[in-house]
Amino acid sequence: MDRKVRVRFAPSPTGPLHIGGVRTALYNYIFAKQNGGDLILRIEDTDSKRFVPGAEQYIMDALAWLGISFDEGVNEGGNYGPYRQSERKDIYRKYVDQLLDAGKAYIAFDTPEELEAARERIPNFQYDAHTRESMRNSLVMPKEEVDKLIADGVQYVVRFKVEPDREVVVNDLIRGEVKINSNIIDDKVLYKSADNLPTYHLANIVDDHLMEVTHVIRGEEWLPSAPLHVLLYEAFGWKDTMPQFVHLPLLLKPVGNGKLSKRDGDKLGFPVFLLEWKDPVTGEISSGYREKGYLPEAVVNFLALLGWNPGDDTEMMSMEDLIKKFSFAHCSKSGAKFDYKKGIWFNHEYIGLADNDRLAKLLEPTLEANGVKGCDPEYVAKAIGLVKGRADLVPDLWTQGDFFFKAPETYAEKDVKKRWSKETPEIMEELIGVLEGIDDMSSANAEKIVLDWIAEKGYHLGNVMNAFRLAVVGACRGPHMFDITELMPKEEVITRIKKAIRTIPTPTE
């Protein structure tokens, strides 16, 4: 193909963007960038009954957070707009009439009740070459009657006329050549007079053609539609410019069989949406990867490897790496298990690599929620640098390093029982004196002085150091003790030791 690569992501604003749709957008983005092509954002909003307020903006915000940008679209503009299908009504009507005039489509007046009666009367009913002549449509009704019904405002649909006993070939970059007999394809509705809008099938084909889309990269769930789309391209005489189809493997449940759903996330405690979503009707709030504390680059890396591999053992890949390495030849035909635990692993790794100042900014809402305000950003960043290796999610930075910002109000009971003896208060008083005499509280210097004092006094190293940690942190956890005391003001360290001496009950034995 010598045309410039042009791909599109075409979500419907019927709710929050599911993680499967996010992966589709990601693969489109990577493929476009890899080939110096264009990525189009087209909003497929022809199903007016399912439209959800706020969903379109949510989709754009979510993809922007992930780092996916568009060359053309509802915000970016371009030479092929409008990019909302609801704004392209007049365009579609022209192509509906073209099919009707060529005898490749027909008008049908069947009511929902008549269709239901046909389903009850005919086993495995579908509207096709074998049943259409027994229904109420322009193929069997006199033209005068058809015209009168339309003039009287009777609602109708336009159906595509699928010719029977044809072998339809779909060429797919992942699945190869897929052959389908046209007898299993029903005469799909292409247009509804009720709202003067096309259905997905017609709008999708017309838009892809007019926008010069070269590759249609979408989820496997759309594969059954591909034969119909091939027939529509042929019916319009556009076979030579038909895009290359790519149907991505499904995302499967982490446990059990079937397609990944929001219910799986709710049950196992992981998000299936990029950003938090509040249902405008029910008020129900669904969690998002951003709010849970994932980094976008971790989500990108995780998603890219669901159904694709680079051909080697490489796991950690930036967007730039993915653009260099990606190939549909390494995409799986079978579904990919959604290993959400692997997603957490990726996030842990990326937090470890992230800039401390950036993490400090991300931690701000958590700090404020815990009553920590006006803290020196440099201090926060340094504290994060000491604990981020233990964090899986951004809020874990607080869990792991809360003691940097708040003195302990309680002390871990099991550590008190194990580490606080009747001699401890006296030893801690001595330690205060040692710390007060240290001018240089750098980690290495303070450690040498304190350890030399412990050795000189003949104290048990583990007992003293664990009691020291318990007094300052509130539990026997955290990074290297002298890294903590290097960062924390010496006065604060001494104040905490004094508080522990006053507060922790001294054992009698």
Image (cartoon, rainbow, N blue to C red):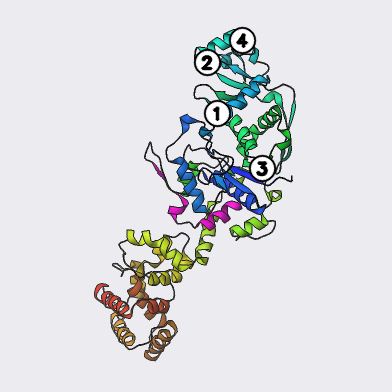
Disc 4 crowd rating (10 Å Cα; few below 14, some 14-19, many 20+) is few
- In this picture, residue 342 sits left or right of residue 374: right
User: What residue is shown with label 3?
Assistant: 215
**On screen, residue 181 above or below 243:** above
- Secondary structure of residue under mark 4: helix
Residue at image point 53% right, 63% down: 349
Where residue 326 sits: x, y (%)?
A: 66, 53
Distance from disc 2 to disc 4, alpha carbons, whole Å, reads 19 Å
Q: Nearer the viewer, mark 1 or mark 4?
A: 1
Q: Nearer the viewer, mark 4 or mark 3?
A: 4
Specify the quadrant of the image occupied by residue 144: top right
Disc nearer the start of the sequence (3/2): 2
- In this picture, residue 196 sits left or right of residue 179: left
**On screen, residue 55 above or below 384:** above
Quarter of the image with the C terminus is bottom left
Residue at image point 38% right, 89% down: 453
User: What residue is shown with label 2?
Assistant: 111
Q: Nearer the viewer, mark 3 or mark 1?
A: 1
Quarter of the image with the N terminus is top right
Q: As shown in the figure, which amino acid type bears the numbered disc 1? A: Asp
Is-magenta flag for residue 295?
A: yes
- Front residue of this view, candidates 291 and 43: 43
Q: Which residues fall within the magenta stretch?
A: 283-307
